[in-house]
Image (cartoon, rainbow, N blue to C red):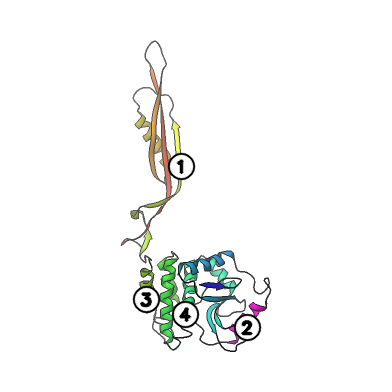
Amino acid sequence: MTFVGRTSFVLSFLGICLSANAQNISCIKTFEEAPASGVAELVPTEVEKLIQELGKNIGVDKRSIMVIPCHFYNGKVGAFYAEGNLGVENGEYIIYNPQWVQEVIGSGNRAQAIALFSHEVGHFLDRHFTARKDLKQDRKELEADKFAGCAVARMGEKWQEMEELLTHIRPKQSDGRYPSRAESIEAAKMSFTDCGGKPNACRIPENGVESWGFERTVSRWSNWRGGGFTQDGYCGELVAQLRSESPEELKEIKVLSREENTRNTCPPFNCPQYKYFCSVTVRGNPVYKEQDSPNCP
């Protein structure tokens, strides 16, 4: 899929626009007539990357959707299909308010932005404006929700974000325009799972460690000591000392090597002293594997 335009996207929960309207036409004309700076200013780079990544991951690259930023667009984001003599090029458009887009991305709602954008794309891919335009509106919305569920999974985002969005924007009972909240959630979750998502996944210690926040090697020598000490004993002291220095962040300490030096402090008599060396690997701040588990909160 090719997303055409000087900027990028993000979707809206307002659903598709079934007929041409003055604001859509005005937004398109303003964008086409504006210089590269000014009304049609570029949105942040992260938004541009997000759109490109979405197009790649949902596996559709043979369509062209014109993505139009519009500062005076009241709908925030929506899909629009232009046909006939409307004064703009015929085709598929996604129109959005770039200020709203920046707020959504900046607040960390990336998964919900992906869900909303892919929902709008789903309307085009499912031909809701053309060959299947007579399909009931709530069925169109349900199909687009299913497409969004798959896209969120393909983008590696969490199901909980998608579920939270649908809970917020879908009515408790179907109103003829939108499916019920439960129906949308069920359809999107099934699609999320079919596309490789793990809806009940979480990161908890029992899943094992995926990576460590930090890893370092600590090597130390003891002072000179008399008899009664051992290499293993000194390594145990070092491990205990390191754990006491930062008990919260340290999760794993492994001994790498140990050795000792000796000296005689009273020749020709035998008065031995020992100095012990220990080297350990210290790991902490673990990132646990994300897996499905009955113990997920």
Sequence order check: which comes first, mark 1 or mark 4? 4
- How many other residues sit within 10 Å of disc 3, few (<14), some (14-19) or many (≥20)? some
Tell me which residue sits at (37%, 79%) in the image.
183
Residue 63's label in the rendered image is: none
In the picture, measured across the screen, residue 290 lies left or right of residue 68, that is left
SS for callout 4: helix
* Residue at numbered disc 4: 123
Classify 10 Å Cα crowding around label 1: few (below 14), some (14-19), many (20 and above): few
SS type, badge 1: strand
Amino acid beneath label 3: Ala
At label 2, which amino acid type do we have? Ser
Give me the C-alpha separation between circle 1 and circle 4: 51 Å
Looking at the rendered structure, the kind of residue marked 1 is: Arg
Q: In this rendering, which labeled residue sits more in front, label 1 or label 2?
A: 2
Q: Which residues are magenta?
A: 16-34
Disc 2 designates what residue?
A: 26
Which residue: 40% across, 83% down?
A: 139
Q: Residue furthest left?
A: 294
Disc 2 and disc 3: Cα gap in Å? 35 Å
Residue type highlighted by circle 4: His
Q: With 218 as the anchor, is 182 left or right in this view?
A: left
The x and y percentages for residue 182 are 37, 78
Residue holding disc 1? 216
Q: Main secondary structure of the magenta part?
A: helix
Q: In front of the other: label 1 or label 4? A: 4
**Does the magenta-highlighted stretch encompass residue 20?**
yes
Picture quadrant where residue 169 is located: bottom left
- Name the image quarter holding the C terminus: bottom left
Dot 3 falls on a residue whose secondary structure is helix
